[in-house]
Image: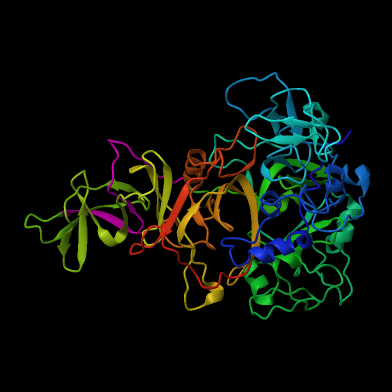
Amino acid sequence: MQRFSPIRAKVSLSAIAATATALSALSGCSRVDEWWSAVHGTAHANTSGPDAFAENIDDDASAGPATSAPRNHHGPDRHERDSGTVDASAAPDSGVVDASGPYTGPTMTATWVWVPIFERMDWNGPKVGYFRAGASLRLRSATSLGNGAGCPRGWYEVEGGGYVCLNRMTTLDARELEGRRPTQPDLAQAMPYPYMTTYRPAVMYRWLPSEADMREVEPERFGVVRDAGAAVVAAPTAGALLTTGVPDGGAAVQVGTASAPTQPNGTAVVATRAQAEDAGVRIEDLQGESGTPLLRRMLSGMYISIDREMASAGRRFLRTQNGGYIERGAASAVRNAPTFQGVTLDEQHPLPMAFMVAFEGYTYDLSPDGQRPVRRERVPRLTTYHLTSDPPVSIGRENYLKTREGFYVRERNVRVVRTSAAPADVGATEKWIEVNLDRQMLIAYEGSRPVYVTLVSTGRRNRDDEQRNYETVQGAFRIYAKHLTTTMDGNSAGDGPYSIEDVPWVMYFEGSFALHGAFWHNLFGYMRSHGCVNMAPADARWVFQWSDPQLPAGWHGVNASTVGRPGTRVYVHYERQALGERGGPRVVPGH
């Protein structure tokens, strides 16, 4: 019986290097992540079916298209090393993700990290989406449609459109997971998973580690000091800072900053992303060698999504949704995620309106002669105001805008939203999205009618330094793929290596430029990102569920198509730039 093993959770960097390189000229907010590169292509030419597909999956690989020759497979014993005690507080098994009520018909359940859904019954054919471990899809029939085209055990049609192969990655009996079903995403919440952040350097293990595994990867935890030439040399104390994370045997990197901490033997360590940037450490350097207990090293400030808590060798570990294991004491829950949300527009809530973006903003009355503003009260950032159609009142060098409540706001302290004319070829009720880079606004339309508005954070613009210019691409696009969540990690000039597991509500519209939720900052209304359009999680959820293509029940990702599943249009522009006019950085910084 093949059971889900979260060890099969990462595509190796070598497996995605070719794709990442090819897309580097297009990528925006992150290096192409492991599922993104796998799901958007067709199966690799070297894979003729699910068995060949599975043989290309190593300890650090998910069920993605093979991009290299088959590797040694360690068998079920290696992959069942996550059989520690599961906390009673762990989420119970959940069935089909569907809000319409209990379903008793036939289903197919994913037992691997992700499983592709094909456009037709052909293992080498195009993919229309995928579902993740533990998710169950409704089948149109309990009977197989045939066992050809690389699927000896048979093809099944799933609701939502598409075909799934019964193989090592799937089962018709969800009970095979035997309590191992990962926590399923909560689609009713802005944050679909529990999230945590590392507050010190840590190790992510490939499987639930034994004491021997911990002694191998973290000898300093047990008072063992490695040879001076080894990459990791640390103090014999619990929770000691890690070094660069260069795989064992590499040269230690000396950090050239006065603030970098050092170990007793003088070897510099990398504790933060900024220090990693100074030392020239890249996300690739943090990866462990295939087949070893080390999946990757984590720097302070990286984010993980949580499945459950488990125990091994007297220590508590968190199992992540991506299949890694990290010590519980190295991470803390994300507690300051943005709660801001934009406005659904209707007759009672029309445009124009304004969002307070100043960190110290006020409302004002005008003096009786109208020549002097009088402060009324200080207001929280991100407060919204409906404006009248009255022209601005100019006093000195400042303009003041009148609200429907009768008081005023200072124009330079707010982002003003007004309706734009729909492109000529947009249908009367067709959905489309406008992103205004000057105003840091997103407006969702249906034909000429605006239906939703919110603040965003687009890419940081720095036209004086191409390697730090993360300007968001401009032009007319369509959403071509949607992911309920997807992992984003990479390297950025000035920030160093970064990793955010399961970024929520992701909608790709050009290369790896995407609209998505951002729970790690609250600077909406200002340029902040690596090129993507950041939204508060609640806003991203609204746009995700409204926009096309729709994500069928149980699916984790869906691709748009020109026939029957088109993506919503997205127009990104500056204030003086016409909708659809192409623009952007000459060189997109590599990640």
Residue 486 location (% of width, % of height): 64, 49
Residue 356: image location, x then y, percent: 33, 54
Residue at 89 percent of width and 58 percent of height: 215
Magenta segment includes 351: yes
Name the foreground residue: 225 vs 345: 345
Residue at x 27%, y 48% (from the top left corner): 352
Above or below, 389 against 527 in this view is: above
Whether residue 500 is visible, yes or no, is no
181, 119: nearer the viewer: 119
Camera sees residue 140: yes
Q: For the C terminus, which image quadrant? A: bottom right
User: Does 499 sit above or below residue 88?
Assistant: below
Q: Is residue 159 above or below residue 311?
A: above
In the displayed structure image, the side of residue 48 where residue 588 appears, left or right:
left
Residue drawn at 64 percent across, 61 percent down? 31
Which of the image's four quarters has the N terminus?
Answer: top right
The answer to whether residue 78 is magenta is: no
Q: Bounds of the magenta span?
A: 339-365
Q: Position of residue 409 (x, y in %)?
A: 24, 54
